Amino acid sequence: MGNEVKIKLTDAQKAKIRQATGQNHSEVRVENIFASPTVSAPAASSSLKATRAMRAAKSMRAAKSMRAAKSMRAAKSMRAAKSMKAAKSMRAAKSMKAAKSMRAAKSMRAAKSMRAAKSMRAAKAMRAAKAMRAAKAL
């Protein structure tokens, strides 16, 4: 291990490593500089695995919340559509009732005017008959 080099990290470098891996490191070790350089930090392989696991967990959570948000939007639009249909059918029912009552009122008025016309004719006929009888009696 005569070819080992330790590099002290600055605060900015420490912060970057902490942000990326979630671990605190004060130095970086480089071994075998001339043969095959390997850069390592204390427990580097475990921190790499931890970082990957953390990223996977975050993306999993993001995907779940995305799905939840989409299903929430879908549920809201479904509810809105249902209430819209209900409101439309309510309006249709009200207008149907209004139309029926309108027709009923018109037919009622027509029936009344019909009865009035018939009674008017009957009264005229009665008066005419009385006048005829009175004329015959003379």
Image (spheres, rainbow, N blue to C red):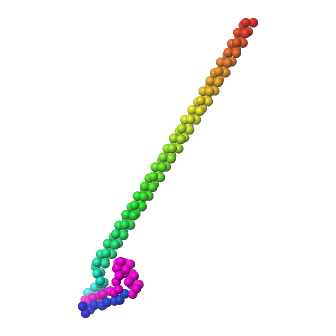
Tell me if I can see residue 11 in this picture: yes
Residue 122: percent from left, percent from top: 65, 18
Q: Is residue 116 above or below residue 50?
A: above
**Residue occupying image coordinates x 37% and y 80%:** 18
Residue 1 lies left or right of residue 28; in this view the side is left
User: Which stretch is magenta?
Assistant: 10-35
**Residue occupying image coordinates x 72% and y 7%:** 136
Quadrant assignment, res 118: top right
Q: Is residue 39 above or below residue 123?
A: below
Residue 45: percent from left, percent from top: 28, 79
**Residue occupying image coordinates x 64% and y 24%:** 116
- As for residue 13 lying within the magenta part, the answer is yes
- As for residue 58 lying within the magenta part, the answer is no
Residue 20 lies left or right of residue 123; in this view the side is left
**Residue occupying image coordinates x 67% and y 15%:** 126
Quadrant assignment, res 52: bottom left
Tell me if I can see residue 34 in this picture: no
Residue 61: percent from left, percent from top: 37, 66
Q: Is residue 59 above or below residue 31?
A: above
